[in-house]
Image (cartoon, rainbow, N blue to C red):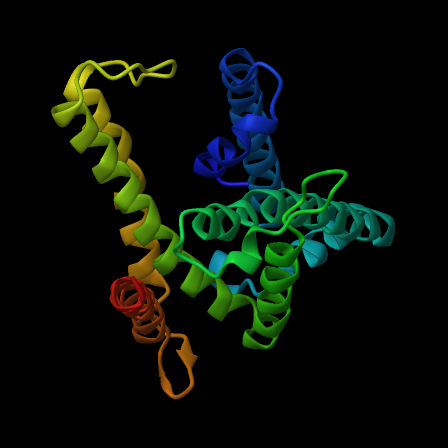
Amino acid sequence: MGWDNASTIAAEVDQPQRTYPRAIMAAVLLVAISYVLPVGAMALTRLSPSAWETGSWADVANMLGGPWLRIWLVLGGMMSAFGMFNALVMSYSRLPYAMAQDGMLPGIFARVTKRAKTPWVSVIVLATGWALCLGLGFERLVTLDILIYGASLLLEFVALVVLRVTEPDLLRPFKVPGGMFGVVLTGALPMLLLAFAMARSNREQILAMNSFAFGALMILAGFVAYWLDKFFAKRLR
């Protein structure tokens, strides 16, 4: 789950003001370890990173520890993907649910189950959309994720700066230290990393067009859908 998605389910977290900082610090440590150890193992094989493809981690595990390590690595990857998918379903399904409550999507997206209050319509629609994306392949999906998710992060960082300027006295249980410089730095570094990733991943093609052009059309479609919603809402009043 992305760090920004944690706020989406804050209402379902026990004592989020205390729980979130602890969880974030622990997650940062675990993420760092999960990146450093595999890269260190890869360095032992002396393989060139340019020769890697999807699934190369399993090949490296086989070189270092044999078939059993390869099997355990694949199983660990499957469990990690399953856990991440569950977390993303929980967080992303709340977005159409909230938009439906605000009148930005049809009211059917606001329907929830009686027992757990799960937005089941939103979950089914999103799961169907994700299933249809499986045919795009891993590399194309990563490229689209970099563009679309990066654009949403940019808006969040811009909103953070704007709120510091326009609402300086707003109650902030979680506040970035360092004043305005700290706030700007918080957004600038991730955006530089995303820009680097975009520059390195601009060769994928979707529907006979550059994947970034395809992603840009999807982003533009969101603006068009928003304007159409506003237009028809005014006409129906």
Identify the residue at horizontal 48%, vertical 61% (top origin): 106
- In the rendered picture of this protein, how many numbered marks are placed on residues? 0
Q: Residue at x 57, y 50 (%)?
A: 93
Q: Is residue 72 above or below residue 109?
A: above
As drawn, the residue found furthest toward the left would be 165
Could you tell me which residue is drawn at 49 percent across and 53 percent down?
Answer: 96
**Closest to the observer: 191 or 152?**
152
Given residues 162 and 33, the one toward you in this image is 162
Q: Is residue 91 left or right of residue 232?
A: right
Q: Nearer the viewer, residue 117 or 132?
A: 117
Image spot of residue 114 (x, y percent):
74, 42
Picture quarter containing residue 174? top left
The residue sitting at the front extreme is: 237
Q: Quadrant of the N terminus?
A: top right
35 lies above or below 225: above
Location of residue 12 in the rendering, given as x and y in whole percent from the top left corner: 61, 28
Using residue 85 as the reference point, say whether residue 175 is left or right of it. left
* Vertical arrangement, residue 90 with respect to residue 106, above or below: above
| Image spot of residue 144 (x, y percent) | 42, 64
Q: Residue at x 37, y 65 (%)?
A: 201
Q: Is residue 64 left or right of residue 159?
A: right
Q: Is residue 165 visible?
A: yes
Which residue reaches farthest right? 68
Residue 54 visible within the image: no
The quadrant the C terminus occupies is bottom left
